[in-house]
Image (cartoon, coloured by chain):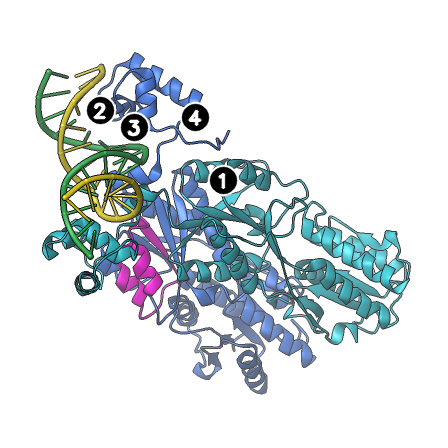
Chain colours: A blue, B cyan, C yellow, D green
Amino acid sequence: MIQEGKKLTMDDVAKELGVSKTTVSRAVSGKGRIGEQTRQRVLEYISQHNYKPNVMAKGLANQRTYNIGMVLQADLLSSDLPFFPKALKGISEVAAREEYDVIMTLIDTNDLSRLVRVIENNKVDGMILMRTLQDDKPAQMLKKSGIPFVTLGLSDDPDICQVDNDHVDACRELTSILLLKGLKKIAVVSGDMNHVINRKRLEGFYQAHKDLGIPYDESLIFTDVDSQMFAARAADRIRMRNVNCIIGADDLITSYLLKKLEEEQVRIPEDMRLASFHDSQLLTSAKTSVTAIKFNTEELGREACKVLLHQIRGEEAAHVTKLSYEVAMRESTK
Amino acid sequence: MIQEGKKLTMDDVAKELGVSKTTVSRAVSGKGRIGEQTRQRVLEYISQHNYKPNVMAKGLANQRTYNIGMVLQADLLSSDLPFFPKALKGISEVAAREEYDVIMTLIDTNDLSRLVRVIENNKVDGMILMRTLQDDKPAQMLKKSGIPFVTLGLSDDPDICQVDNDHVDACRELTSILLLKGLKKIAVVSGDMNHVINRKRLEGFYQAHKDLGIPYDESLIFTDVDSQMFAARAADRIRMRNVNCIIGADDLITSYLLKKLEEEQVRIPEDMRLASFHDSQLLTSAKTSVTAIKFNTEELGREACKVLLHQIRGEEAAHVTKLSYEVAMRESTK
DNA sequence: TTGTAGGCGTTATCAG
DNA sequence: CTGATAACGCCTACAA
């Protein structure tokens, strides 16, 4: 299967068959005119002797790497939310199907040097940027560089190819359901407002209230909650206000809230309703199953990769793709 | 910073400076004799005009890609255990420092085709294989291919470069502590026995008993538990046996156990002690904080990458590297 | 339909 | 110390 020895080159094949490299090249690539029998002969020899074109050489010749890059903020790996692994799975699947490989690039909000390096070094034909920010340095950099790229997350810049679940609508629907259950006072505990995703969710929250003509209380919205401590503090404030429903921005935040509420002997759902986003295993150990919006992140990755490949090939590509979501009603909002 | 236009080539630089490509190459690579002033002149021009060598060309010339591959079973991404992201972070850090990039390759137990492709296509200079199996097809394949590689997980094959935490010792220590607390009957709920890691942990469990001269009960060891249902079933059996201490093989399994125990109103630690491996956020929402063995997975990734780079460069590399662990005693085993 | 020759951007060998 | 020149393996006008 895999030979240890020196690999066969196109030249070897050509010599062995008594034809020119050009002919072999044409047989392999399918481009250019070539006699059907010669083609067959070459192809047969190739599969027989397991010849594989050298990607580096091919890349050098036509300025392509057959790699796509996946860029993400390193801190996305620090949180145990499984967003990145799932997306990778989807991306990798589509990429592999098209003979592409995936190169990972980890960056830091203040240090894009690795991204710059990958691009300058010509290591990828295009990139997928995980998560978008309000003031998105990486996206701006990519745009300036002229390399094809798509973001996994929405952006205000209409020039940018972007793919994401419809978080506005997802949160709008969730909020509506809760409001219609008669829960008039809903608190939100959200993450970093520099992440577009959190802004979108809040937008949906507002929309639902507007749709139903129900006022919301700005002081029940806690933003930029990024630690167990802040989450606990938010929970305290919420309870002091006698509110009995909380939407957690993601499963991690919700798990923090859950822990705090249990410590305080708050019964769920009797004393407090709780809803979350993702529906990951982070909440499996919870005593009460938690209502959540589910996203098919693998599908999201697949879609993003397809769009990127289109772009790389110079084909027309949708600039904004919104994917769906699913609401899973559980005990926590009974 | 990043130019949209055509990139500078070594030839451009050479012509502009009135020297030969060879000279420029020498200045850049530091190899070969070259006059100090010429060197300075070239280097200055280069940084001034932001010249970057083309990695593809370099690769073609010396048969190197400056990529390392990271291979993992796709199902490692299905579980929300954060092992992979953490390891990636460590690997990527060391790789980037040495101007290497990381290519992801997802495989399936029965389908190594993507791995074969990456290798045959010459896309990487070496690979890191995540997790080892008892009958390790991927490892065997890599070995046969002759490409440098290291496994993140131990292997019985002494020829293979392997890096891992000392799981035997970790579980031995954990078990000893529990035994010395007077918990004579300890149950184990473990995952797939085809994973070396689970075998090693069990080995440590046995050792601890032998060390202390305490017999263990084989019927309290549940292996190949890979779902919430099986975990719940194991918990049931364990409770029927009146055992009051369980070691869960990882945080996911432990979180399943935890949920089941809470449903059954079992008080922790009063009625049941519980210990786990990893100490990830999967257990943050647990009411009772859980005793666990902690591993520095980022460090593990860094170490593996270092070893691999040594191997790639043909330097001497340690064949077996065992990293440490940490025991975090918590409320669940009070 | 097929082949020749030159180029992609570096590195390495071997003279000068 | 420096510079031609030939690889590296593939692609693509342009010829034949």
- In the rendered image, the vertical position of residue B87 relative to residue A43, given as above or below: below
Q: Secondary structure at mark 4?
A: loop
Task: Identify the secondary structure beneath mark 3.
Answer: helix
Q: Amino acid at mark 4?
A: Asn
> How far is mark 4 from mark 1, CA to CA?
16 Å
Could you say which quadrant of the image residue B239 lies in? bottom right
Q: Which residue is mark 4?
A: A50
The spot of residue A259 in percent (x, y) is: 64, 74
The reply to whether dot 4 and dot 2 touch (C-beta < 8 Å) is no
Residue pictured at 68% horizontal, 75% vertical:
A267
Q: Amino acid at mark 3?
A: Ser
Asked if the residue under mark 2 is in contact with the one under mark 3, i.e. CB atoms within 8 Å, the reply is: yes
Residue A170 against residue A199 in the figure, above or below? above
> Can residue A27 be seen in this snapshot?
yes
Same chain, marks 4 and 2?
Answer: yes
Instruction: From the image, tell me which residue sits under label 1.
Output: B115
Q: Is residue B240 left or right of residue B161?
A: right
Residue A158 seen in this snapshot: no
Mark in front: 4 vs 1: 4
Residue at mark 2: chain:
A
Which of C7/A127 is in front? Answer: C7
Pointers 4 and 1 within a single chain: no
The residue identified by callout 2 is A32
Q: Is residue A135 magenta?
A: yes
Q: Position of residue A79 (x, y in %)?
A: 52, 67
Query: Per the image, is A152 magenta?
Result: no
Residue behind mark 3: A29
Range of residues picked out in magenta:
A113-142
